[in-house]
Amino acid sequence: MHSDGKLRSESWNKRRRLLNVVARLIAWSIVTFFFASGWMVTHAAEAQKNPPQATEGKEAPSAPLAIPPSEIVPRGEQTLRALQEIRFQIAAEPMSH
């Protein structure tokens, strides 16, 4: 009977240690989560304070502009033509390597 009580005590100690480890892992996970989310919020706030500078000669619009549905395809085609022209210009330039 004495050994049975000792086994129960050892089993209880193992459970307590396991619960302690699990509790610490959960606590560290929560701390890490709040630290990471706090960093992300701070980083996003800093990004809003310092918007990227507009390129020279062009001003960034103050508000987003909606493109009417009738202009989506023509603008897409115009963009593709501009990109193709850039690609051809780059391909025509001699390689300096």
Image (cartoon, rainbow, N blue to C red):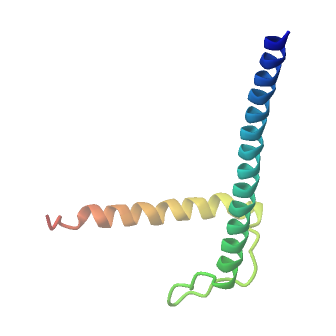
Q: Which residue is at a point 70% across and 74% down the rendered structure image? A: 42
The answer to whether residue 20 is above or below residue 97 is above
The answer to whether residue 8 is above or below residue 55 is above
The answer to whether residue 33 is above or below residue 7 is below
Where on the picture, by quarter, is residue 15?
top right
Q: Which residue is at a point 24% across and 64% down the rendered structure image? A: 92
Residue 32 location (% of width, % of height): 69, 56
Q: Quadrant of the N terminus?
A: top right
Residue 91 location (% of width, % of height): 27, 61
Which of these two is toward me, 73 or 2? Answer: 2
Where on the picture, by quarter, is residue 35?
bottom right
Direction from residue 73 to residue 10 in the image, left or right: right
Identify the residue at the far left of this view.
97
Q: Which residue is at a point 66% across and 72% down the rendered structure image? A: 43
Which of these two is toward me, 75 or 63? Answer: 63
Direction from residue 28 to residue 89 in the image, left or right: left
The answer to whether residue 30 is above or below residue 86 is above
Q: Quadrant of the C terminus?
A: bottom left
Where on the picture, by quarter, is residue 2?
top right
Identify the residue at the far front of this view.
2
Which of these two is toward me, 51 or 44? Answer: 44
Identify the residue at the far bottom of this view.
57
Q: Which residue is at a point 79% across and 33% down the rendered structure image? A: 16
Residue 73 location (% of width, % of height): 65, 57
Which of these two is toward me, 37 or 22? Answer: 22
Direction from residue 56 to residue 90 in the image, left or right: left
Q: How many marks?
A: 0
